[in-house]
Image: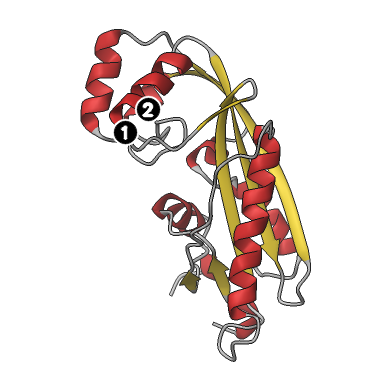
Amino acid sequence: MELRQKLILASGSPRRVDLLKQAGIEPARLMPMDLDETPKKSEHPRSLARRLSADKAGAAYQQVRKDLTWGGSYILAADTVVAVGRRILPKAELMQEASSALHLLSGRSHWVFTGVCLIAPDGKLRQKIVETKVRFKRLSGYDIECYLASGEWRGKAGAYAIQGIAGSFVQKIVGSYTNVVGLPLFETLQMLSGEGYDVHTGWTEG
């Protein structure tokens, strides 16, 4: 892989790695950025996704920009926020948090915002916010109880992963499906291509 084609993903999310691989792109390095993701007072969900994705990309850029091996790489970061109105649903770590989120999402629509930030080898920063509207069916107490027992909710924004069991809860989706998984592929590849990254390199056999 040529230097200009080195892509650093400032995330440890296996879902984002899988999505990039689905598009024929394999990150050369994963650099999860351990930042405080607490929303600021009255911060809009869209603004939070924008801020965190930029902060993660910027932190990774500062770490590698003078590195002989990794300086000059493309740096990609993303952050996904799930919200009902302006209410941000955090990544569920406790069962009670997950239960509260699922009861809130039951039978109603919510928004998924993903901020995608790309820093090109020349230091230029590009950013995009992608939003998707998702409607859940009305969940019974037994639905929620069984989903909690699955453990799939753990560490997930909004306490669910659409690519797992919770995909069966989705009544309607308006917008990008891959955005809800964690990385909107269409917009991400457009950004990479726009900055000179050859997104087709991994498409050929052999």
Tell me the amino acid under the disc marked 1: Leu
Point out residue 142 in the picture as x, y percentages from the top left corner. Answer: 24, 11
Residue 16 can be seen, yes or no: yes
For the N terminus, the image quarter is bottom right
Which residue occupies 66% across, 69% down?
198
- Of residues 196 and 140, the one drawn nearer to the viewer in this rendering: 140
Q: Is residue 43 left or right of residue 143?
A: right
Q: Secondary structure at mark 2?
A: helix
Which residue occupies 59% across, 59% down?
56
- Of residues 137 and 94, the one drawn nearer to the viewer in this rendering: 94
Q: CA distance from mark 2 to mark 1?
A: 5 Å
* Circles 2 and 1: CB atoms closer than 8 Å: yes
Which residue occupies 45% across, 57% down?
17
Q: Residue furthest front?
A: 41
Please state the total of marks drawn on the protein image: 2
Residue where numbered disc 2 is placed: 97
